[in-house]
Structure formats: C-alpha cells, structure tokens
Amino acid sequence: MKATILVEDLVKALHYEVLIGNQEALQRNILTSEVNRPGLELVGFFEYTDWERGIVFGRKELAFMERMDPKTQRRCFDALTAATIPFIVITRGLPCPIILQEIASDKNFPVLKTDRITSAVITEIILYTYEKLSPQQLIHGTLVDMYGLGVLICGESGIGKSEAALELIRRGHRLVADDSVLVYAMFHRLYGKAPVHLKDYLEVRGLGVIRITRMFGMTALRDSSQIDYVIDLVPLEESKKYSRLPDQTEWKSYLGERVPSIRLPVSGGRNMADLIEVAVTALRAQSSSGNATEELMAEFDKLAATGGTKDD
C-alpha cells in the first residue's frame, strides 16, 4: 500500500505558517518527495520543470525576483502556481512578493512561510515526505528496540510474541509496535512503526491490553525503528524440519529489502526473552565477525581431513 500526504499534513508536521490558502487549498495532494528550488524557471525556461514538486523560495530567488519587472513576475508566478504544484514555501521569514500574493489569492493556492533557513527546509520536506510516500506493508509481528537495534519478532498467532516483548520491556528494552507493524522502506533500509490506533498498546493473553507508557513510562516506547533483525518464533515440532545447526545466514524479505533472520523453537519451560536477547547478540556478532556455526563446521572439516578427533 502507499500513503498519501496532504499539504495540511505537511503544515502540521513541520509547523509552517499558512500565508495564503483556505482549508480547501490545504487539501492538495503531495505526490512526490522531491522539491523544486526554481532557477531557470525564473527566466522563463520551463521545459524540464517537474510540475508535481513543491516549490521553495529562499533569499536568492526572492532577491532575483525583485529585479524583475511586474509583467515578468506575473508570468513567472502564474506558471509556478499551476494546479498540479502542491505548495510554495518561503523561507527565512522573508516577505511574500505582492504579485505572488495576488495570484495565489485568486487561485486559492497554498503559500507557506517558515523562519528556518532554505537548506534546512528542503531537507526536512524531503525527509518527511520520503517516509510518508515510501512503499508500506502491514505485517503481523512485534517490533522491539533492543540495544539500539530494531528486532522484529514474528510467528503465528498465540505463539508468545507479546509475552516475550513484555518481558523484554521489563528489562529495559523499548516497544515500537505490537501485533501489527507498518513496515516501510527508505534509502534501501527497512523501518517499522505502529499504526496510529495501536501505538503504545500491547496485548497479552490473560492480561488483556496494556498501555506501555502508563505502566513503564515514556522511555519504554519508541515511535519508529530501523528493522535490523528478524526473530522467527516457531513451534518446537516445526523446528525439527530445519537443520539443528544452520550453515548459512537466513534472510527475510519485505518490500524488496532483506533482513538477517533466525528461528527460535518455542516450547514450555524456555525463557523466550532470554533466548531473544542471546539471538540478537549472536546476530550482531555474526554480522561483524562471522558465523559461529560456519567456524565450528570448518574446524570439524579440518579434523576430518587430517584424521584427527574432536578431542584433539
């Protein structure tokens, strides 16, 4: 699925002032994370202009426009307030040109204003819209921040994901999302967060729904996290289908991006929170210094080749 953004969302998220445009104007869709800082457009060259990008006017652009005659300004501003362009942002708290005010008011076109510098405004718009417009996938699982790493705990319903997450939170780790995780891709990395209506909630069978911040405080919750590892909880019977010592790294794929994964068999008497902590530590060590299983098997291969024994 793909999210949509309205100009109104951008205004609220980045705290911009609305100079021109009513509520209807703020319902324009933002379709791309790219923005346009006009250059050649100011001298009338529009051949390669992307008419779906929002526009940012900084000090240089406004200074150049002041040198234009009113007729040229009117022609330029009329083009840059086209119906497909979602907004104009004026940076550094600079005044909006009179002719732009007239044209934007006639068209009910949204003109926004901020005191922040131009480069910062461009960066924040791109980062905000890139996340919102990235491909998204809603998956069943629980996402926990452990040691500064995002750990996605997967498994069939009722296997104990939330119970394990609750114990991990008691140990000082942080909850990102329980039951449903909204996964999105940014810059070839995966991230996850809770759907808005599920944020801060964790459901444990027998206990019901728990409000995490109410029970453990604000530090027990994180808004979003990169997904670094996947822990796949499987029934003990199913785990027998797989090799006891997997000889290579396993991977899970979401939205075309791969994440290292490990299976953990679940059975009565096993402390899953302990095992998840150890599994994450092992995956982290494996990514930096190699696979311990591969190293062990290599040692056995050497012994077999030399005719040695395991006790040598």
Image (cartoon, rainbow, N blue to C red):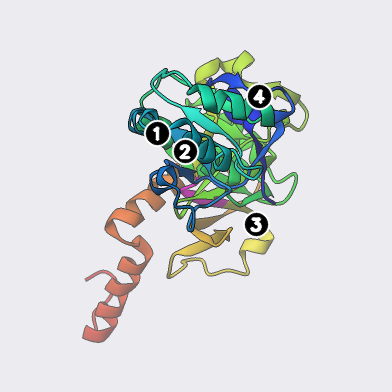
Q: Which residue is mark 3?
A: 236
Which SS class for mark 1? loop
Relative horizontal placement of residue 289, taking residue 110 as reference (left or right): left
- Cα–Cα gap, marks 3 and 1: 75 Å
**Percent of width and height locating residue 164:** 60, 37
Q: Which residue is mark 1?
A: 68
Query: In front: 263, or 253?
Result: 253
- Nearer the viewer's eye, disc 2 or disc 4? 2
Q: Which residue is mark 4?
A: 21
Q: Earlier in the sequence, mark 4 or mark 1?
A: 4
Q: Earlier in the sequence, mark 3 or mark 1?
A: 1
Are dots 2 and 1 in contact, CB under 8 Å? Answer: yes
- Nearer the viewer's eye, disc 4 or disc 1? 1
Q: Earlier in the sequence, mark 4 or mark 3?
A: 4
Q: Write down the quadrant of residue 206 in the picture.
A: top right
- Cα–Cα gap, marks 2 and 4: 23 Å
